[in-house]
Amino acid sequence: MNTMRTAILLAFMTALFMGVGFLIGGRGGMMIAFVVAAGMNFFSYWNSDSMVLRAYGAQEVDERTAPEFYLLVRDLVAKAGLPMPKVYVFDSPQPNAFATGRNPQNAAVAASTGLLQRLTPEEVAGVMAHELAHIENRDTLTMTITATLAGAISMLSNFAFLFSGGRDNRNPLGFIGVILAMIVAPLAAMVVQMAISRTREYAADRRGAEICGQPRWLASALQKIAGDASHIENIEAERNPATAHMFIINPLNGQRMDNLFSTHPDTRNRIEALLAMTDISPGGSTPPEPAVKATRKARSVPTTGWGRGPSASSKGPWS
């Protein structure tokens, strides 16, 4: 159901992009818009992962530089039956994480230093399982294409007024078409982009709970992350607001309510859905105990290791 809904929304987004081109330049404009959309999607397909990791100054870690965290991810990857992604850590006091990459064979997961310091190992396992679910579902590519199309629609809309004044204007709807291209189309694109993002989060929550085998781990993590996101700044996210949809919780506001312009579902609804899960798939029935036991031994590491900060010692409400 979620896959079908996402496909329909993506098709609508593409049609909307071509429609804006049509309103600006008739059939010729529509074809130009289609070519531009294809080119932008191709560029995003190959470069989205490196661009976002560079934007957040993420540093790749391995079994030598961050053994506990790397081992946890590796065990989850084995349970999910996925290729091992590259593992990154980025410096931010706000607990959060994201996944990126064009496919499971070329993917990366990244966690903030705040996530590793403020959450328990079990909660971190739930978060990283959620990010692996995004990779398995190819949500990283879907949302990159969606964001690219939304940005392109906004770009075309900025040109609508310029093209509307010329004698050779091919806009079939005249001034009304200009208004639609300038105002309605970008608004509709934003609504569709956010709807796709919310749909993919619910699916990743469920699959993430199956991978780690404990829905309560992720539920507890979501509550902590949402609470911290509301009062701990993420400076890089503020500089790159277009990437907010990539994180497990919106880093700009914590996302505590559902609305047409929210990148994520209401955190309370996500938690309730997780707590309602009683049946775990056989592939995810056993928690990653070796990784959890290993991480319990660690106490502090800055950017490239595992730390336990102020709230890490306190159990979540469902631990």
Image: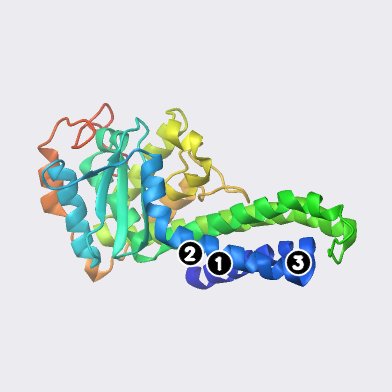
The answer to whether residue 131 shows anywhere in this view is yes
The answer to whether residue 195 shows anywhere in this view is no
For disc 2, the marked residue is 42
**Disc 2/disc 1 C-alpha distance (Å):** 6 Å
Circle 1: residue type: Ala
Q: Callout 2 environment at 10 Å: few (<14), some (14 to 19), or many (20+)?
A: few
Label 1, secondary structure: give it: helix
Residue found 60% across the figure and 52% down from its top = 151
**Disc 1/disc 3 C-alpha distance (Å):** 16 Å
Residue 130: % across, % down? 34, 55
Residue 252: % across, % down? 50, 36
Does residue 39 appear to the left or right of 206 in the view shown? right
Circle 3: residue type: Phe
Residue 173: % across, % down? 87, 64
For disc 1, the marked residue is 38
Who is closer to the viewer here, 110 or 231?
A: 110
For disc 3, the marked residue is 22
Quarter where residue 102 is shown: bottom left
Quadrant location of the C terminus in the rendered image: top left
Label 2, secondary structure: give it: helix
Residue 308 vertical position relative to residue 1 in the rendered view, above or below: above
- Whether the residues at callouts 2 and 1 have beta carbons within 8 Å, the answer is yes
Quarter where residue 78 is shown: bottom left
